Amino acid sequence: MRRPNGDQLLRLEDAVEWIADALATDPSLVSPATQRSDLKGWDSLGQLILMSALDQDFGIKLTEDEVGSMASVQDILDVLKRHGRLRAS
Amino acid sequence: MVQPFERLIPYAAQTLGLSPATVDEAFRPATPSDLAGIIALRRAVLPEMWWKDEAVLQWRYFGRPSPDGSTPYWVFRKDGAIVGACGLEPVTLSVDHTEVAAVRTLDIMVRPDLEGRGLGPLMNLLLFKHFPILLVTGSNDASHKLISRLFQHAADLVFWKTLIGSHHIIDASTGPVSRLITSAADALLSIARSRHNVSPQPEVSLRELSRFDEDVTSLMIRCERAGRVHVRRTAEYLNWRFFDNPRCRYRAYGAFDRGQLNAYVVTRLNLVRPNPRREGEIVDWLVDPEPEAAQRSLAPLLAFALGDLKKTGAGLITCAEHGADVTHAAEANGFVLRDAQRIPFFVRASSPGMHARLTKGGGWFLTRADLDVE
């Protein structure tokens, strides 16, 4: 997994690639519109891995509401944006 | 080696609204007072059961404690309710003729409203802390997906199949002429089977068994040797697993070569569950490792057992195995290998040496008895 540098803001395409990496998924299958149900790697174990990766790589600790509401790649991108880790497009 | 996922436990605790400090205490062996909560969970997860679940729970878990006295059924409690559970079957492995304790995991389930929150992985991760060797097969694609990442694939069971009666396979599709067609088909099947000469030699006697006794324990010990990994089959285990099993009726047969039990076969024809093709199964067997035993004992014994399955109306017979010394006997009885159909078998061991031996070292002896699906 390519870890982000310090407080570096991610470009959208880098964020999508990071998400694909975290979910052990081919990046070509991942876009902001991709739903959780479309990705084999985003099962309950994948969800835990994602939470761990957000914590380890960005210091983001998800709330219970955020965990429960993540249903698409866009939702993950929104989390990154809310925590100031996504570069404005 | 499988990835160390233990770092995920705090996150699983968080998704469930628990603290990491309490999550260990939340997952513990069940007690008899938990039975009502367990039954409620199982009904929520499996609304259509063809078996009497309370009787099965008593037989499989509450009536057969683990070596430490605890019930081999672990429950996860949240807010006073049982929201997850996992059944265990303590077994003894013979690994290269050395006895090793292991546990099969089966029956893992999560209350439907908590699916996707990581409780399934969490229960597995907590079990890893308690049990040094875990064996598992998945019963569906979703469980395979999870299991293949938490455990390591060790072997695939492959399927052998043979048709001994055509009635229930032809009948539905051919309407009024089905009787004529099935009679002709069954006659052809009988002719085809008669070409396989699997009569026992005079010194080999075949009979149905009403219970296993120490003869089978002796047979098991003869089968345990360097290069092989068996789940040990003692008389006590086999009697419990098959004859005391309330889910399904099993039948067992023994081949005695000059008075010594040289092979056994266990079959089932489960008509309590939906079974339109009347599929019978060769569930388990052992055969003496002496070179000619498969031909002298197992092949005729399998034929003997198939005869009884045919008498009880079985149509298709299947046999799932890995490394189980059954090729000669299966082919001699008209079974065909269906290599494309496989059931994966997974292992996890906390010791790197044992993990490597069990996952890459080969020599596993596996039959359908090593699966939890009945």
Image (spheres, coloured by chain):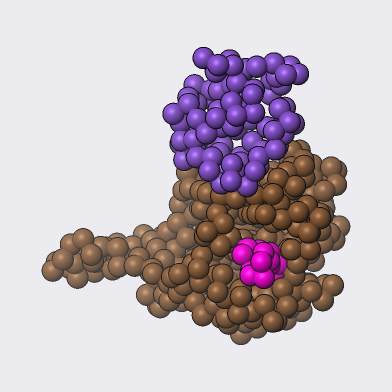
Relative to B1, A18 lies left or right: left
Residue shown at the point (51%, 65%) measured from the top left: B45
Which one is in front, B322 or A36? A36
Q: Does the magenta stretch include residue B26?
A: no
Q: x, y percentage for residue B186?
A: 29, 66
Which of B50 and B183 lies nearest the eye of the viewer?
B50
Q: Is the magenta stretch mostly helix, strand or loop?
A: strand
Kindly identify the residue that appears in the image at 71 percent across and 27 percent down: A58
Residue B211 visible? The answer is yes
Q: What color does chain A have in the rendering?
A: purple
Q: Position of residue B36 (x, y in %)?
A: 60, 80
- Image point 56% across, 49% down: which residue? B116
Locate residue B215, reporting x and y percent: 74, 77
Of all residues, the one furthest to the left in this rendering is B176
Up/down of B145 relative to A55, above or below: below
Vertical relation: B94 (above or below) B342: below
Chain letter for brown, please: B
Q: Which residue range is magenta in the image?
A: B72-89
